[in-house]
Image (cartoon, grey):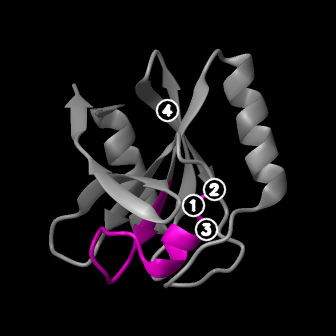
Amino acid sequence: MFRIEKSVIQAIIAHAKKELPNEACGYLASVNELVTSHYELTNIDQAPDHFNMEPREQFAAVKEMRSRGQALRGVYHSHPETPARPSAEDIRLAYDSKISFVIVSLAAAEPEIRSFLVAKGAVTEEPIEIIE
C-alpha cells in the first residue's frame, strides 16, 4: 500500500502541469511510511517522453529529507501524453525495488496517478491510499 497525503498529490499534479510539455520529476518523502512531502527536481533532459534528474538536486533533496527525519519513499514523474503506466525505459531505469515509482498522467481530462514497484524488470502495481 502506498500511503500519501492529499496535499502532496495536488502538489505533484501542479508540478506536472507546470512542466508541460515536458515530463516533471521528483522525490517523495515519508515519515512512518506516509508520504508527507515532495521534492521537485529538474528534468535536465527537458523532454516530453523521458526524464533525467539533476544529480546535485537529488543529493540535496536526500540530505534535506534526512535532516527532517524523512525517508525516500518514492520517485514520481509525469507522462504528459501517455497513460500512467511504466514505459520500457521507466522499467529499465528503476534502480531500487524498495521504493515506489509514481506516475502522473495528464493524457486525459482528469489527471491519473498510479504507483508501481519494479524488481528485476517485473512491475507490480500497488494500491494508493490518499490521506486527507
Q: Mark on residue 37?
A: 4
Q: Position of residue 112 (x, y in %)?
A: 22, 61
Badge 3 crowding class, 10 Å Cα cut-off, few under 14, some 14 to 19, many 20 or more, is few
Q: State how far apart marks 4 and 3 are (Cα).
A: 23 Å
The amino acid beneath tag 3 is Leu
Question: Is the residue under label 3 in contact with that under label 1 (CB below 8 Å)?
Answer: yes
Mark 2 touches mark 3? (CB < 8 Å): yes
Kindly indicate whether the residue at mark 1 contacts the one at mark 2 (C-beta within 8 angstroms): yes
Instruction: Look at the picture and state if 132 lies above or below 74.
Output: above
In terms of secondary structure, where does tag 4 sit? strand
Q: Residue furthest right?
A: 56
What is the three-letter code of the residue carrying label 4?
Answer: Ser
Looking at the image, residue 74 lies above or below residue 72: below
User: Residue, x 50% and y 84% (percent of image)?
Assistant: 48
Check disc 1 and report its element: helix, strand or loop: loop
Mark nearest the camera among 2 and 4 is 2
Q: Secondary structure at mark 2?
A: loop
The residue depicted at 38 percent of the width and 60 percent of the height is 123
Badge 2: few (under 14), some or many (20 or more) residues near its Cα, within 10 Å? Answer: few
In which quarter of the view is residue 39 placed? top right
Q: Position of residue 71 (x, y in %)?
A: 60, 26
Rendered position, 107 above or below 15:
below
Question: Residue 94 has which mark?
Answer: 1
Q: CA distance from mark 2 to mark 4?
A: 21 Å
Q: Which residues are magenta?
A: 76-94
Report, in whole angstroms, how far the alpha carbon at label 1 lies from the one at label 4.
21 Å
> Looking at the rendering, which quadrant does residue 60 occupy?
top right
Which residue is tagged 2? 95
Q: CA distance from mark 2 to mark 1?
A: 4 Å
